[in-house]
Image (cartoon, grey):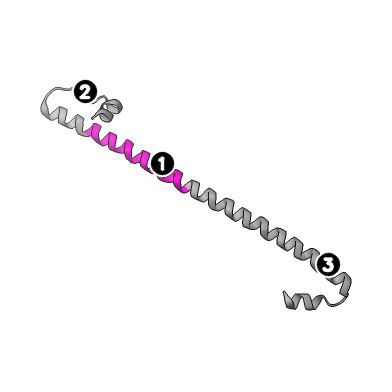
Amino acid sequence: MSECDRKTGIKQLRVRGLKAVRFCATLKAIGVNIFRATAARMAQNQKKSDQVECESCLNHAIFVVKEHFMMTLSHLKKIYSLYFGSYEHKLKMAA
């Protein structure tokens, strides 16, 4: 009731009569439920965006490691071809 009063001002209804008060109170209760549903949805979306951001960071880290590995492999390939000349096809077959 406290939340309902704070958000909708249900204690100061401007109508008289049982039917009118019941109708206004029902509308205000629906409004409070909409506020709660919105807050729950926003919290759920925030949780999902945090999870996506974490996955994005992990994907970036994997990409960086892969690129460093490929760069190192490229350097090794150049060194191998300098020392052994035309034996580059053996490196391709081994990889």
Structural crowding at the residue carrying mark 1, measured as other residues with C-alpha within 10 Å and reported as few (<14), some (14–19) or many (≥20): few
Indicate the amino acid at tag 2. Answer: Lys
Q: What element carries label 3?
A: helix
Residue 57 lies in the magenta-colored region: no
In the picture, the quarter occupied by the C terminus is bottom right
Q: Residue at x 54, y 50 (%)?
A: 54
Q: Which residue is drawn at 45% across and 46% down?
A: 47
Q: Which residue is drawn at 30% across and 28% down?
A: 7
Q: Name the residue under label 1.
A: 42
Image coordinates of residue 44 in percent, x first then y, are 41, 45
Q: What element carries label 2?
A: helix
In the picture, the quarter occupied by the N terminus is top left
Q: How far apart are marks 1 and 2 (CA)?
A: 29 Å
Image coordinates of residue 2 in percent, x first then y, are 26, 28
The numbered mark, 1 or 2, whose residue comes first in the sequence reads: 2
Image coordinates of residue 49 in percent, x first then y, are 49, 46
Structural crowding at the residue carrying mark 2, measured as other residues with C-alpha within 10 Å and reported as few (<14), some (14–19) or many (≥20): few
Chief secondary structure of the magenta span? helix
Indicate the amino acid at tag 3. Answer: Lys
Q: Which of 10 and 17 is in front in this view?
A: 10
Q: Nearer the viewer, residue 28 or 70?
A: 70
* Label at residue 78: 3
The numbered mark, 2 or 3, whose residue comes first in the sequence reads: 2
Magenta span of residues: 27-48
Q: Name the residue under label 2.
A: 11
Judge depth for marks 2 and 3 and give the one in front. 3
Q: Is mark 1 on a helix, strand or loop?
A: helix
The image quarter containing residue 19 is: top left
Q: How far apart are marks 3 and 1 (CA)?
A: 54 Å
Specify whether 84 is left or right of 56. Answer: right
